[in-house]
């Protein structure tokens, strides 16, 4: 679908609010008003077709002979049937637009935990022992995780040789997905893999949060290769802060070469070391397991994918805290006023025959 059509449809689906006779009113999905136009056209066309049909019969036969030679021909039945269908569609269009009248205020409380996702964005994550690549598969699984979370705040830390906050803690999952798509190993300022600094930065994100949750967790997605950084110190700090680390292994223990791409994204060669040998990257199961167990967390791994389903189950079992309370305005739905008579009219249209059959005398 072209971009301008997508934007137009998106704007049409935005709620429409207005005041009528002093009442707060609105339409939650005004785009469905187009069905009202369709209903009006159906009713109009049915009326015109009925009149045209009758005029053709009258032109061929004398008015007094119509009932004898064309028994059951009705002038009003097709028009009424079409009117029932048209008006029924019109009312259903109004119902689907979700008319609202009147408002009421209510206190809503959002409960959840604070989750910081630490994503490895080093060059080794370009390896393709997990299809289509370690990083792309991790990105896909994280998007699925965000779709399943309910009320939790999520932050994102990306790291290679350096670590930086890609997204602060937020309940706006769409924003987190946008920042997630922007993670690119080719754009990282420094190569390598510094898990220690990334974990320290994740702890800072959790500590700087307003109204922090009782349960806090760091989800680390990596192949576990730690070329630099003080992992033990970072793990000890997280344990002292009572922050669990759930580690998710990405990659294979057999090893895989690291592909090198040019600026156009085309494969060129595999990464070589200083002696000209192909660099092989392997999953460090032991290192990731040690990080998780030291903080009371757990290590998750799937040989051909990314084990995010188990991470979601672990998060759902944690104690939820009240993260936000606010007064929201809720509009009273009035779609039933249009849906019920619309259904009755459609049923009447189906029951009404377009012509009346007469029994022979």
Image: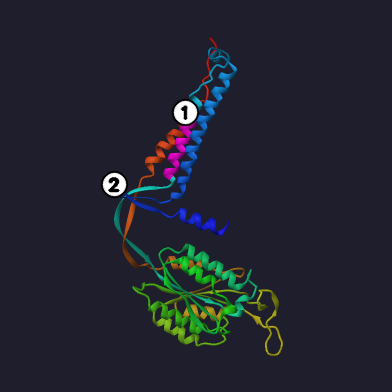
Residue 80 counted in the magenta span: yes
Within 10 angstroms of label 2, few (less than 14), some, or many (20 or more) residues?
A: few
Q: Quadrant of residue 120?
A: bottom right
| Foreground pick, 232 / 34 | 34
Which element carries disc 1, helix, strand or loop? Answer: helix
| Foreground pick, 358 / 115 | 358
| Foreground pick, 44 / 281 | 44
| Left-right relation of 22 to 231 | left
Task: Say the numbered circle drawn on residue 80.
Answer: 1
Residue at the left extreme? 22
Q: Bounds of the magenta span?
A: 79-95
Q: Quadrant of residue 111?
A: bottom left
Residue 283 visible in rendering: no
Where does the image place residue 218, in percent across and percent down from the top left? Answer: 46, 75
Task: Say the numbered circle drawn on residue 287.
Answer: none
Q: Earlier in the sequence, mark 2 or mark 1?
A: 2
Task: Say the numbered circle drawn on residue 21.
Answer: 2
């Amino acid at each position: 679908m072209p971009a301008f059509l997508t934007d137009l449809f998106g704007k049409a689906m935005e709620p429409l609010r207005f005041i009528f006779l002093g009442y707060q009113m609105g339409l939650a999905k005004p785009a469905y008003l187009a069905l009202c136009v369709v209903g009006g056209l159906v009713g109009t066309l049915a009326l015109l077709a009925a009149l045209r049909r009758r005029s053709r019969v009258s032109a061929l036969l004398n008015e007094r002979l119509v009932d004898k030679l064309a028994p059951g021909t009705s002038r009003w039945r097709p028009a009424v049937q079409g009117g029932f269908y048209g008006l029924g569609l019109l009312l259903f269009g109004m119902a689907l637009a979700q008319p609202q009248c009147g408002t009421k205020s209510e206190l809503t409380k959002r409960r959840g935990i604070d989750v910081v996702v630490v994503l490895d964005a080093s060059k080794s994550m370009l390896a393709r022992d997990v299809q289509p690549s370690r990083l792309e598969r991790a990105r896909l699984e994280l998007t699925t995780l965000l779709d399943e979370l309910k009320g939790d705040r999520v932050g994102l830390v990306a790291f290679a040789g350096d670590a930086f906050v890609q997204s602060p803690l937020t309940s706006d999952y769409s924003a987190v997905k946008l920042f997630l798509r922007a993670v690119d190993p080719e754009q990282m300022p420094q190569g390598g893999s510094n898990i220690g600094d990334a974990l320290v930065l994740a702890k800072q994100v959790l500590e700087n949060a307003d109204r922090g949750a009782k349960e806090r967790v760091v989800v680390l997605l990596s192949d576990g290769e730690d070329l630099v950084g003080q992992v033990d110190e970072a793990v000890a700090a997280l344990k002292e802060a009572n922050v669990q680390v759930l580690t998710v292994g990405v990659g294979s223990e057999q090893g895989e070469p690291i592909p090198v791409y040019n600026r156009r994204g085309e494969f060129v060669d595999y990464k070589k070391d200083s002696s000209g040998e192909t660099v092989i990257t392997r999953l460090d199961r032991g290192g990731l397991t040690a990080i998780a167990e030291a903080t009371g967390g757990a290590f998750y791994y799937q040989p051909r994918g990314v084990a995010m389903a188990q991470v979601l189950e672990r998060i759902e079992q944690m104690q939820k805290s009240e993260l936000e309370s606010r007064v929201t305005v809720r509009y009273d739905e009035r779609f039933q006023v249009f849906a019920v008579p619309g259904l009755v009219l459609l049923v009447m249209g189906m029951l009404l025959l377009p012509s009346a059959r007469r029994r022979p005398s």
